[in-house]
Image (cartoon, rainbow, N blue to C red):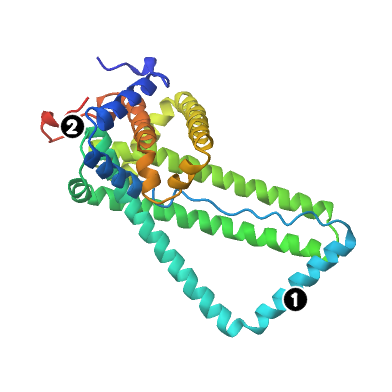
Amino acid sequence: MMPTPDHISVALPVGQAIERVKRVLFQPFDLAKWLTIGFCAWLAQLGEAGSSPHFNLGPRHGRGGMDDFRHTIEHAWNWVVQNLYWILPLAAFLLLIGLALWVLILWLSSRGRFMFLHCVALDKAEVAVPWRKFARAANSLFWFRLLVGLGSMLVSLPLVVVMALAAWRMIERGQPAVAGILELVGLGLLLLLLAFVCWVIGRLTSDFVVPIMFRRGIRCWRAWGVLLGLLAGNLGRFILYFLFRIVLALAIATVVITAVLATCCILGCFLAIPFLGTVLLLPILVFQRAYPLHYLAQYGPEYDAFLPAPGEPSSALVR
């Protein structure tokens, strides 16, 4: 019997997701199946993994340090101005290449999310079938994610420009100003707020909108309407879900870091290799995909991605 909304639990789906991992990957273990599902997971994760280098230039104290820094910036700016005739075309070309790659990755990962969900929900290791079956839904998801990404860029870019101008004014003065620092802090907080909103939208889309699209065969905007209706009556439960997801993420990160350190970072080197890292982490990725599916299924059969879609034979049911 399906639990009523009065008995929604964030802990119960943990055990169910672990059982799903066992069933999909270990009962029985099949290397070909593992690699096939790993490919779908890798496709779904495109654009999400990666790291950025961090540079520590060391502290510079005193007016002389600020003057030297200002002189360096002015020298660099003059060099750029003198070479604009080739810098602008090159920058425009690289920008177009970067945008094209971003759009391609966004499109492929949108396809991959439905493929990976298909594998986890139905316990099937298939690539071609979900690629064709969910093409329309994946394209709808792609356009939604593209609009959200472009919108966030349009909002964040002016903030970054204003921050750069504020920093430049302090550099020209030769010393920090309280008003300038407060302006930078305020703009930085706005950027953090924007990043948080985008993260919440992305998390809701991945965890719930995609499964609703998968279950009902509807477009992304309609699935968002369904989810917003569900959120309106269960906001507290979903806030608790997000908090519990953070706890789960910390626990998973602790396990992975411990494993990396226990192997003297050898495991970390393998995890950094594209596709291979996804294959090695597949049990975790299957768990992370299955957990929100089991949580959402508690709200009723119309939200249960493990049930066959309308019009499909009941033999598609995999529990």
State the image coordinates of residue 111 (x, y, percent, origin top left). 29, 50
- Taking 196 as reference, is 79 left or right? right
Q: Residue 99, located in which quarter of the rendered image?
A: bottom left
* Relative vertical location of residue 87 with respect to residue 31 in this rendering, above or below: below
User: For the residue marked with disc 2, what is the amino acid?
Assistant: Pro
Mark 2 — residue? 308
Q: Residue furthest right?
A: 63
Q: Residue at x 29, y 26 (%)?
A: 22
Tell which of 180 and 264 is nearer to you: 264
Q: Earlier in the sequence, mark 2 or mark 1?
A: 1
Return the residue at label 1.
75
Q: Residue at x 26, y 48 (%)?
A: 137
Q: Tell me the kind of residue under disc 1.
A: His
Q: Nearer the viewer, residue 113 or 6?
A: 113
Q: Position of residue 254 (x, y in %)?
A: 52, 31
Q: Residue at x 84, y 55 (%)?
A: 177
Viewport quadrant of the N terminus: top left
- Horizontally, residue 285 falls left or right of residue 60, namely left
